[in-house]
Image (spheres, helix red, strand yellow):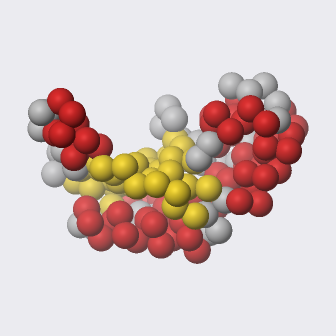
Amino acid sequence: MTPFHSHRYGDVRTTSLAFDEAVERLEGTLKEEGFGVLCRIDIQAKLKEKLGIAFPRYVILGACNPPLAAQALERDIQLGLLLPCNAVVYERDGKVHVGAVDAIRMLSVADLPEMEGVARQVNEKLGRALDKIAPRSST
C-alpha cells in the first residue's frame, strides 16, 4: 500500500493559500500530473441556488488521467461509475483545505486486486499535486 496521508476517503490538507488561489493552483498541479479537469462544481453556489442554504466556499474538481482511466476501463467497463477522481478545495474554521480522493480505497469497492497498481499510481500523482500546494508537514 502506498503512503497516502489518508482521512476516511482521501488526503486532505490545510493550505496557507487564499481560497481562489488554492482552486487555481490545484487545477494547475493536477494538470502537471497528467490530469485533465473535466468539471468544476461550486457547491456553495449550487446549494444557495437550489436550496437557499448559506454554505461555506466549497469546490469539487473532477479530474481524469486518460492513460490510467483507459487501463481501468479496459479491465472493467463499469469502473466508470467510480470516475473521475475528485479533488476538493473548501473553507472551514477560517482555513482553506485541499484534498484528493484515495484511489486505493475507492477502487477497493470494486474488489479488483489487480487494479491496485493503477490506484497506487493515481494516489502518487494526486499526492504530488497536493504537495505543491500544501506540503504534508502543514496538516
Horizontal side of 45 relative to 52 (left or right) equals right
Instruction: Please name whichever residue, 43 or 88, is drawn nearer the observer in this view of the structure.
Output: 43
User: How far across and how far down the image is residue 108, in percent?
Assistant: 71, 29
Count how many numbered circles sit on residues in the image.
Answer: 0
Task: Determine the residue positioned at 16% across, 39% down.
Answer: 48
User: How far across and how far down the image is residue 19, in percent?
Assistant: 25, 62
User: How far across and how far down the image is residue 85, in percent?
Assistant: 57, 47
Q: Visible in this render: residue 15?
A: yes
Against 110, is 93 above or below? below
Residue that extends furthest to the front in the rendered view of this protein: 50
Against 66, is 85 above or below? above
Task: Determine the residue positioned at 35% across, 63% down.
Answer: 23
Against 114, is 31 above or below? below
Against 104, is 66 above or below? below
Q: Visible in this render: residue 127?
A: no
Horizontal side of 25 relative to 19 (left or right) equals right
Task: Determine the residue positioned at 82% across, 35% down.
Answer: 76
Instruction: Please name whichever residue, 31 or 117, is drawn nearer the observer in this view of the structure.
Output: 31
Horizontal side of 139 relative to 106 (left or right) equals left
> Quick one: quadrant of the N terminus?
top right
Task: Determine the residue positioned at 25% across, 41% down.
Answer: 46
User: How far across and how far down the image is residue 99, in percent?
Assistant: 44, 50
